[in-house]
Image: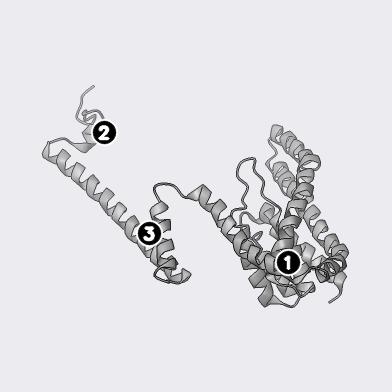
C-alpha cells in the first residue's frame, strides 16, 4: 500500500478516535481500538491487537479528571504501533515510542485549546445570548473538529510520512540489551497504569475485594477470567442481599406502624386525614 495512502488512513483513524466530540463517549480513543485498526491497515492485525492490549494497560488510568489532562494517547498509540510494525520490532518498542509521542502531542493539543477553541466558545456564547440552540450545537461540533480532530489527524499523518524512515534508522542502532530492557519496562508500565487507576478507585470499603482477587490469582492460580466471573457472581449476590435487606426493613417498618394503629398515609400528612376533615 502506498505510504501516502497509509498516512491518510492513519490520520482518519486518529480522527475517529477523537470522534467523541460527535459520537459521545464511545471508547474509540482507547489504544485497544486504535492499535488494532493500525495493525489492520499495516497488514499485521495480530501484532496490532497485542500492542493495543499492552498500551491499554499502560494508559488504563489516562482519563481527564478536572484540570488534569492525560497524554494524547490516540496519536501515541497509532504512531507507536505504526513505527514499531514498520521496523519489525516488538511490543516493547511500541510502548516506548507511544508514551513520549503522546506526551509531545499533548503540547500541540493544549496549544489548540488555547488558540483555536476559544473562538468557537465565544461564538457559542453569542448564540446563547440569542437563544439560538442550533448555533450552539454547530459551534460545539465545529470547535471539536477544528481544535481537536483535524489537528491530531494532521499530526499523525505528517508524522508518519516524516518519521518512519528516521525511526527505522534509530531502531537499527539500538543495542539488544536496550531492547531487552524495554521488554522489562513493558511489564512494569502496565502495573503503573493499574496503580494510577487503583489510586482513584480503592478505598476502605472495597479494598477487601481487591485483596481477595489478588489471592485467587496468585495463590490459587485462578485465571483472570475466572477471577472476573467469581467477582461478578459475588457482586450479584451482595447486591441481591442488600436489596432484600432493604425490602425487609421497609416491610418491618410498615408492620410496626400498622400494629401501632397509625395510618401511613396520615403520617405523611402530619397525622391529619385531609379527606375527612371539614374546613
Distance (Cα) linking label 2 and label 3:
35 Å
Label 2 element class: helix
The label nearer to you, 1 versus 3, is 1
Residue 98: where, in percent of width, then height? 72, 60
Distance (Cα) linking label 1 and label 3:
44 Å
For residue 267, above or below residue 245 = above
Q: Residue at x 82, y 71 (%)?
A: 172
Left or right of residue 230, residue 271 in this image: left
Q: Residue at x 65, y 72 (%)?
A: 49
For residue 169, above or below residue 279 = below
Q: Earlier in the sequence, mark 2 or mark 3?
A: 3
Q: Is residue 80 visible?
A: yes
Quadrant of image for the N terminus: bottom right
Label 1 belongs to which residue? Answer: 178
Q: Residues within 10 Å of mark 3 (few under 14, many from 20)?
A: few
Q: Residues within 10 Å of mark 2 (few under 14, many from 20)?
A: few
Q: Foreground residue, 186 or 156? A: 186
Label 2 belongs to which residue? Answer: 268
Label 3 belongs to which residue? Answer: 235
Q: Residue at x 61, y 67 (%)?
A: 53
Residue 87: where, in percent of width, then height? 79, 73
Residue 169: where, in percent of width, then height? 86, 69
Label 1 element class: helix
Amino acid at each position: 500500500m502506498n505510504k501516502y495512502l497509509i498516512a491518510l488512513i492513519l490520520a482518519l483513524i486518529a480522527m475517529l478516535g477523537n470522534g467523541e466530540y460527535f459520537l459521545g463517549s464511545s471508547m474509540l480513543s482507547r489504544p485497544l481500538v486504535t492499535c488494532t485498526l493500525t495493525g489492520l491497515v499495516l497488514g499485521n492485525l495480530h501484532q496490532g491487537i497485542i500492542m493495543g492490549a499492552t498500551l491499554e494497560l499502560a494508559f488504563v488510568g489516562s482519563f481527564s479528571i478536572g484540570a488534569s489532562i492525560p497524554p494524547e494517547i490516540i496519536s501515541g498509540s497509532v504512531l507507536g504501533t505504526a513505527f514499531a510494525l514498520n521496523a519489525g520490532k516488538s511490543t516493547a518498542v511500541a510502548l516506548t515510542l507511544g508514551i513520549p509521542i503522546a506526551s509531545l502531542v499533548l503540547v500541540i493539543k493544549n496549544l489548540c485549546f488555547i488558540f483555536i477553541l476559544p473562538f468557537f466558545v465565544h461564538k457559542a456564547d453569542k448564540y446563547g445570548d440569542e437563544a439560538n440552540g442550533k448555533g450552539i450545537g454547530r459551534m460545539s461540533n465545529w470547535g471539536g473538529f477544528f481544535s481537536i480532530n483535524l489537528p491530531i489527524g494532521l499530526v499523525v499523518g505528517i508524522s508518519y510520512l516524516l518519521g518512519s524512515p528516521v525511526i527505522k534508522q534509530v531502531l537499527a542502532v539500538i543495542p539488544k540489551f536496550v531492547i531487552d530492557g524495554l521488554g522489562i519496562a513493558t511489564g512494569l508500565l502496565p502495573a503503573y497504569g493499574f496503580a494510577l487507576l487503583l489510586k482513584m478507585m480503592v478505598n476502605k470499603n472495597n479494598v477487601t475485594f481487591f485483596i481477595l482477587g489478588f489471592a485467587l490469582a496468585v495463590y490459587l492460580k485462578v485465571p483472570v477470567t475466572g477471577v472476573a466471573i467469581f467477582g461478578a457472581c459475588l457482586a450479584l449476590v451482595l447486591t441481591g442481599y442488600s436489596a432484600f435487606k432493604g425490602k425487609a426493613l421497609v416491610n418491618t417498618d410498615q408492620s410496626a406502624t400498622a400494629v401501632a394503629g397509625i395510618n401511613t398515609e396520615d403520617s405523611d400528612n402530619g397525622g391529619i386525614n385531609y379527606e375527612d376533615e371539614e374546613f
